[in-house]
Amino acid sequence: MKFITAFVFLLMACAPVPRFYLQYGTDFKQSDLEKMLAENPLPTGENIKVVTLGQGPAASHHVVQIRDRETPHVHKTHDATVMMLKGQGYLMLEQRRIDLMAGDVVYIPRGAAHYFTNTAREPTVAFVTYSPAFDGKDIIPAKLP
């Protein structure tokens, strides 16, 4: 058992750190996940932290950290594509439960009621693209089971 634990730890230590290369007009931004998280930690006692990496007229890009869960909501005018970077949990998308882990990608169309629940011990981290660019105001509470 110790061998398996050590092997898994070694694999995780060797995993590449996701990097971000984003260009908005002539503004080119480059960063990596570990640096971004170190500069923008999720404070103790806070549940969700959203860091906007940048935006153009058609889309915006964010890193979202979730300690526990979101409340059910809808985005009426924004589509979202979510790529899980760290952790695991499940997304309730309308009446469907989707189990997610690092590396998974899910598309959430505008108007679809949804919420995410973290099942990991550490905060889950995701890269989210909204189209059109997200201003933080299009979050409408919704009811889901």
Image (spheres, helix red, strand yellow):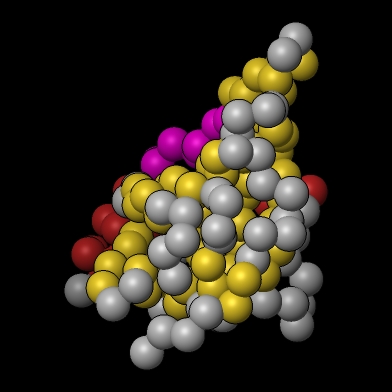
When asked about the image quadrant of residue 32, the answer is: top right
Q: Position of residue 17 (x, y in %)?
A: 50, 38
Q: Residue at x 35, y 69 (%)?
A: 93
Q: Position of residue 25 (x, y in %)?
A: 72, 13
Query: Between residues 1 and 23, which one lies in front from this camera angle?
Result: 23
Find out whether residue 16 is within the magenta segment. yes
Q: Vertical placement of 11 versus 24: above or below?
A: below
Quadrant of the rendering where the N terminus is positioned:
bottom left
Q: Residue at x 55, y 39 (%)?
A: 131
Q: Position of residue 54 (x, y in %)?
A: 71, 34
Q: Vertical placement of 107 versus 27: above or below?
A: below
Query: What residue span does the magenta drawing correspond to?
Result: 13-20
Question: Outermost residue, top direction?
Answer: 26
Query: Between residues 39 and 11, which one lies in front from this camera angle?
Result: 39
The answer to whether residue 107 is left or right of residue 2 is: right
Q: Vertical placement of 18 versus 115: above or below?
A: above
Whether residue 122 is visible: no
Question: Outermost residue, bottom direction?
Answer: 145
Query: Between residues 92 and 117, which one lies in front from this camera angle?
Result: 92
Q: Residue at x 37, y 89 (%)?
A: 145
When asked about the image quadrant of residue 88, the answer is: bottom left
Find out whether residue 9 is within the magenta segment. no
Query: Between residues 126 and 93, which one lies in front from this camera angle?
Result: 93
Counting the numbered discs, the total is 0
Whether residue 14 is visible: yes
The answer to whether residue 12 is left or right of residue 31 is: left
